[in-house]
């Protein structure tokens, strides 16, 4: 038995999915919008997420992006559109599979079972990072420096998160692109340089001699714990 979370605003579809997946032997929780879904993911850490794209407030794409900041749990996207571009977008954005409504019951159950079989235990990085100067909360997506909140773009947030989680390690622009950008294909490594400069400025860490985000010419960047 696996614990599944269905994020779907259509109550009829949500009920049908829940009954079907319960009959297939799983425990199913339902969230009716993106915010409720994110809370449930954070609180209950499901084994698999079924995520509708058309949701009120935070849509499925935004939920997908936020979940991928904190976990590699398997995600099956559900959509009414069925357009090829949507599919590509979903898979590039980190969805594991994609199902177009209307789908048959057996198709849905088969996809869910296949994803569960394929996925190992999910890893989670939603713990709050705090080194006394910098505090970073992936679940809420907030950053504080010396107690003051800093507003970052999603890319800047991911960039900082990946540097902090690999503290002390030198990361190349290519590695940072792969981790922090939704779709790194065709993006020049120069973009990483500018994003790091912007990030440092926002954090008040522009001075290269003291900045906790250290750049090593010709190699890349590393985060060192502020003294
Ligand atoms: Ca919907």
Image (cartoon, grey):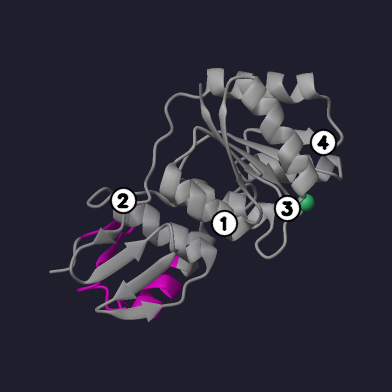
Quarter-of-image position of residue 161: bottom left
Gap in angstroms between the C-alphas marked 4 and 1: 23 Å
Residue 100 numbered tag: 4
The residue stretch that appears in magenta: 196-224
Which of the two residues, 29 or 135, is positioned nearer the viewer here?
A: 29
Query: Contact (CB < 8 A) between labels 4 and 1?
Result: no
Residue 9 numbered tag: 3
| SS assignment at label 2 | helix
**Residue at x-position 66% and y-position 44%:** 51
Mark 1 or mark 3, earlier in chain: 3
How busy is the neighbourhood of tag 1: few (under 14 within 10 Å), some, or many (20 plus)?
Answer: some
| SS assignment at label 4 | strand
Quarter-of-image position of residue 92: top right
| SS assignment at label 3 | loop
Gap in angstroms between the C-alphas marked 1 and 3: 11 Å
Q: In which quarter of the image is the C terminus?
A: bottom left
């Amino acid at each position: 038995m696996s614990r599944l979370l269905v994020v779907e605003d259509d109550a009829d579809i949500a009920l049908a999915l829940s009954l079907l997946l319960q009959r297939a032997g799983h425990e199913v929780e339902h969230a009716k919008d993106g915010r409720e879904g994110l809370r449930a993911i954070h609180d209950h850490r499901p084994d698999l997420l079924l995520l509708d794209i058309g949701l009120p407030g935070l849509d499925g794409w935004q939920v997908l992006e936020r979940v991928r900041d904190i976990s590699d749990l398997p995600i099956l996207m559900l959509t009414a559109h069925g357009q090829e571009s949507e599919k590509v977008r979903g898979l590039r954005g980190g969805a594991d599979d994609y199902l177009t409504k209307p789908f048959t019951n057996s198709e849905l159950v088969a996809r869910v079972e296949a994803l569960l079989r394929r996925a190992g235990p999910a890893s989670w990085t939603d713990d709050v990072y705090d080194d006394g100067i910098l505090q970073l909360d992936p679940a809420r997506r907030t950053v504080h420096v010396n107690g003051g909140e800093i507003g970052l773009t999603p890319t800047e947030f991911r960039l900082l998160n990946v540097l902090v989680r690999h503290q002390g390690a030198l990361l190349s622009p290519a590695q940072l692109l792969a981790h922090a950008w939704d779709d790194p294909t065709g993006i020049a490594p120069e973009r990483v340089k500018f994003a790091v400069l912007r990030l440092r400025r926002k954090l008040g860490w522009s001075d290269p001699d003291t900045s906790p985000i250290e750049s090593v010419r010709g190699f890349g960047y590393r985060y060192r714990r502020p003294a």
